[in-house]
Amino acid sequence: MRDTSVSVRRRVRTGLCSAALFGVALSLVGCDQQDKPPAPAGPPPLAPEMRLHPVTFDALPGWGGDRPSAALPALRWSCEAFAKRTDADAWVGPGAYGGTVADWQRLCAGLNRVLPPGQESGQEETVLRSWLRETFQPYAVGMVEAGGQAKYEGTFTGYYEATLKGSLTRQPGYQVPLYGPPADLITVDMGALFSDMAGVKVVGRLTEKTIEPYWTRAQIDGGALAANGAPVVAWAADAVDAHILHIQGSGILELPDGGAVQVGYAGNNGHKFVGIGRTMLDRGLVGSGQASMPAIRDWLKTHPDQAPEVLASNPRYIFFRQLQGPGPLGALDVPLTPGRSLAVDPRYVPLGVPLWLSSVDPDMLPLARLMVAQDVGSAIKGVVRGDFFWGSGESALEKAGRMKSSGSYYLLLPRDRKEAPPARP
């Protein structure tokens, strides 16, 4: 989700509607939708800092060593998301490279024809490799730097589904609230009002007819939400574990009776994410090379007198909901597949599309495999930037918390796709 600040003024009939993310009130009345300019016929332009270079499948690093069939569940979940969409003519991603929703619905139907769901043949690997080659064109993704040269390498981190002790009711030992979205939390999609503000969202607190910045983490932890009866989804046993849940976005609560409940992302307070590892380094609380997630967690739990101030340095606050069915859910609203789902920056990589990752894990072992873009993250910003989903539990934390690797990726985009209309004179 983009954290950005905007200010716009536009005359609408006899009124003036203005907006800014923080500090400027947003009028919720008087903006007439009929004065919006018509939506452009073509796809959104490719960002000038992004470059796509076509390559062959044989040029993909490690193409021969992966088992693409391990990504088949993730591919099917993306296809399910595309199948639910009714905007068949909508463009998928910037530029015309990604085609339209209809193009993806058609290729997903083709996948189901060659590999019918629930019908294992023993030939999945061969059939899938052939289908991928026939259906997709790989593109190396690069970041254009000063001088016009493209850099095809970026940073890849890891994340996981947190596991922590929790309760559905407040009781001794479970005193840390996990809030659901408060009634006064509002998100305004500025792109729905003004076409030149596509992708910009204003998040804040509704007060009569204006929006003000929502409460920060420090204010919420200090009781700002308790006064307005905000819903509590569950109660965590430990504040540090709860904060890690906020960072990861989803988790499993181990209940006192031995059961478990899954919770997932339902919203945020609109403030920019600040990594507590960076805070601890800047304050000299940990040394260089000691800011991995496992190390941070251990330090916070052994320094309970200093932990609250460190946690409050991250003003961003996440709101949760209970999940039913398979999970955790990513931003595409489909279950994530461990080792095959990747969080990306959707300004450059459209959600739902497959890509080829070339990187290494925290132990410098190769990560060259078929992945699917199915999630986003407040810290995942950039043309070549990804967050590798490792799964759930302590073993996933051990990997995710140490991962910060260089690497590259290649978008797999439809060969058979709608062409962009010619530019208007």
Image (cartoon, grey):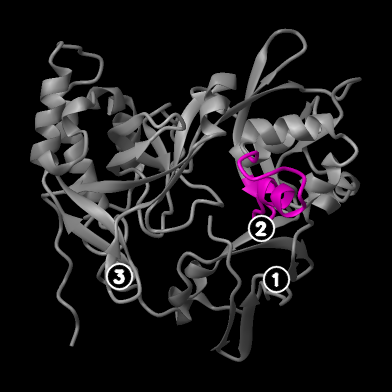
The residue located at (27%, 26%) in the rendering is 72
Q: Amino acid at mark 3?
A: Pro
| Label 3 sits on residue | 45
**Which circle marks residue 22 in the picture?**
1
Q: Amino acid at mark 2?
A: Gly
Q: Nearer the viewer, residue 410 or 321?
A: 410
Mark 3 lies on a secondary structure that is: loop
Contact (Cβ within 8 Å) of mark 2 with mark 1:
yes
Q: Nearer the viewer, residue 85 or 336?
A: 336
Magenta stretch bounds: 267-291
Q: Is residue 69 left or right of residue 394?
A: left
| Label 2 sits on residue | 270
Neighbourhood count class around disc 2 (C-alpha, 10 Å): few under 14, some 14–19, many 20 upward: many
Residue 257 location, x and y as percent?
Answer: 75, 8
Q: Main secondary structure of the magenta part?
A: loop
Tell me the distance, in whole angstroms, between the alpha carbons under discs 3 and 2: 27 Å
Q: How many marks?
A: 3
Tell me the distance, in whole angstroms, between the alpha carbons under discs 3 and 1: 28 Å
Q: Earlier along the polypeptide chain: callout 2 or callout 1?
A: 1
